[in-house]
Image (cartoon, rainbow, N blue to C red):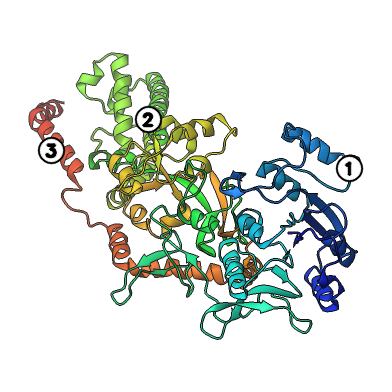
Amino acid sequence: MAPLIVLSQQDSPPTWFNNGTIVTLINDIFVGVNNVDIISEDHGLGQTERMIQVLNAKTFRIFGGASPGEHIRISGCPLPAVRGPFNESVSQLYDKEGDEENLDGFIQWDQSYETFGKLLDQNQNGGYVVFANLSGFRQLMKCLLDPVGTYLVLLKPSDEYDVDRLGRLLRSVWRHRGVYRLYVLAGERIYTWDPFGRNGTLEFGVLKELTVDGELVKVPEIDFQGYPLNIDMFWSTYSEPVDRDNLSRSEFIGVDVLVINHSYPDLLDFGSLLPNGTFSGSLGRLSRRESDIAFVGFFIKDYFSRAVEFTAGVYNDELCCLVRKARRIPEYLLPFTIFPPGLWMLLLCMGLIYAGVWIFVRAGIRRTLSFQRKDPEYQFNLSKRVRTASSLRKMLQICIDTYILLMSAPYRRFTRSGTERIFLFGLMIVSLIFVSMFQSSLASVFVNPLYYKDINSLAQLDKAQYKIPVKYKGFLDDVFPTNYSTLMESLRNRMIYEPSDEATLARVSRLGNIATVTRKTTLTLDNAIYLSTNQLHMIPECPRTYNLAYVVPRHSVLLERINGVLLRMLNGGLINHWVAEMNYNVTLRNWEQVRRVHNANYKVLTVVDMEFSLYLLAIGLAYERHAGTRFEYSYRAF
């Protein structure tokens, strides 16, 4: 941010110009600053020219205009009056600014604060504003001061000032605007506010007079000597409030919490943009500089506010969709789930193929026996009913016998033909393999619960036509990217903001016909119960991945130091260690629940689990009761 030089109109050289100490201090103040913007009431000699002579190695822009007018206010800020024609539009004014030949050394602006701000923003490092007197500075300091700027306010010799009053003003600028490189030249003395110095008591902040032997105010490199920070915290993934009986307020635990002072912004947590253009929640407190930093991870994205900025990235996370876990398969259907449908079809087709091969083998044997004048019916050990049946009935009987052998069921009429016995021996070997697989898997399907297929892709979620309610307005824009694909647009249109007293994940588990969105890390921490008890299912395809960082007011003078500490923690692996430790602590805290879920994976088979088998047994016994006697008579007759 370029420095602010406050000049007043004066015909004779100011007294400070001939003071070598003041000139030296002014040069020290602007060391490292190459571009200086001057706003002055005079257009030629006076303090403007004297300041240019002192800072002769700099690049200057001079803004000419009258004193601030009380009648011009936009958003509560009085603005400079107009020197140029009142009927010029903003676009025409910008064109005039681009024509350097017509500037005549001065830049003129209209009544709008936007135009004035644009002029200052043309400087890469920001703008430097000049005020005529202390009262004018008080009127405009809430609008035009930037924390990264360097400001020098020159008071008129006729201005009366009180040191205590000046100290209160500079302290107010620090608290409300975060500016500490603000210097006031009153007479032949330069004052500034040192927010990190002690005033002899436990409080921080002291009015300091610059001297040649003294140092300019700087942000401490390492040791802040206990300087207090106002920190916002609220419930989030890595910060959780815990009530203590001996504390007047909640205590936080989690990765984001390291021996810090905290305060609740309000019940809106992160905050959002209000209709009047301000922000609620933590974003509102940061934009008003009521807090120095929010130690809660924010997605690094555009929050439509220039009043805040991010620290270095701390960790990353994904936004994933959650749906209710698919229902458990009924026990009477479990035997059919041992093999997938494709394998069942293969077994069915294999029975038909073996039956066809058996028919072909038997036809060849029959033809051979006819040449030898032997009775094929005797060799095949057929019953009287089958012997006299048609050829189609005999082929049907072969198909039935094939499936009986594939299922390893009792087969009473075994063939006497050696060739056919070799074929049937191979068929029974195949049957033994499949029956063994079936029997060994039968117990596992009862012990391990099986569920219907879950929704495992965003395309399936879109096909299910589920609404996606969310509890944060920001999720409406954060989850599914715009203009990416028709699938994302369709899912985005199903998102709705529905604040509710009931937890969103609990609603999804209870209703089943809606989905929701949450951070992936919360599923291993606060919401692990929903997954461990098979109430919810996370769709593996997560639509968005974000880097997360903490948030500070825009151009905070503490940002560089905070980033230094965070980067050292990241390089040392501390944050990853704390995340792993937090996951472990959550596991210990919920160990009893984890143990119950772990034990639930093992199940002792009971008679109820064998319900389907008992049904089959009862059906078989009933069938034997009514039809067994007739079959026995037929066999005896044979």
Nearer the observer, 229 or 342: 229
Q: Amino acid at mark 3?
A: Ala
Disc 1 residue crowd, few under 14, some 14–19, many 20+, Cα 10 Å: few
Q: Is residue 51 visible?
A: yes
- Image coordinates of residue 155 in percent, x first then y, are 72, 65
Nearer the observer, 78 or 465: 78
Q: CA distance from mark 1 to mark 3?
A: 102 Å
Task: Please give left or right for residue 131 compared with residue 381 in the image.
Answer: right
**34 vs 419: above or below:** below
Closer to the observer: label 1 or label 3? 1
Disc marking residue 100: 1
**303 vs 412: above or below:** below
Q: CA distance from mark 2 to mark 3?
A: 25 Å
Q: Is residue 375 visible?
A: no
Asked if labels 3 and 1 touch by Cβ distance under 8 angstroms, the answer is no
Task: Please give left or right for residue 48 compared with residue 257 in the image.
Answer: right
Q: Quadrant of residue 638?
A: top left
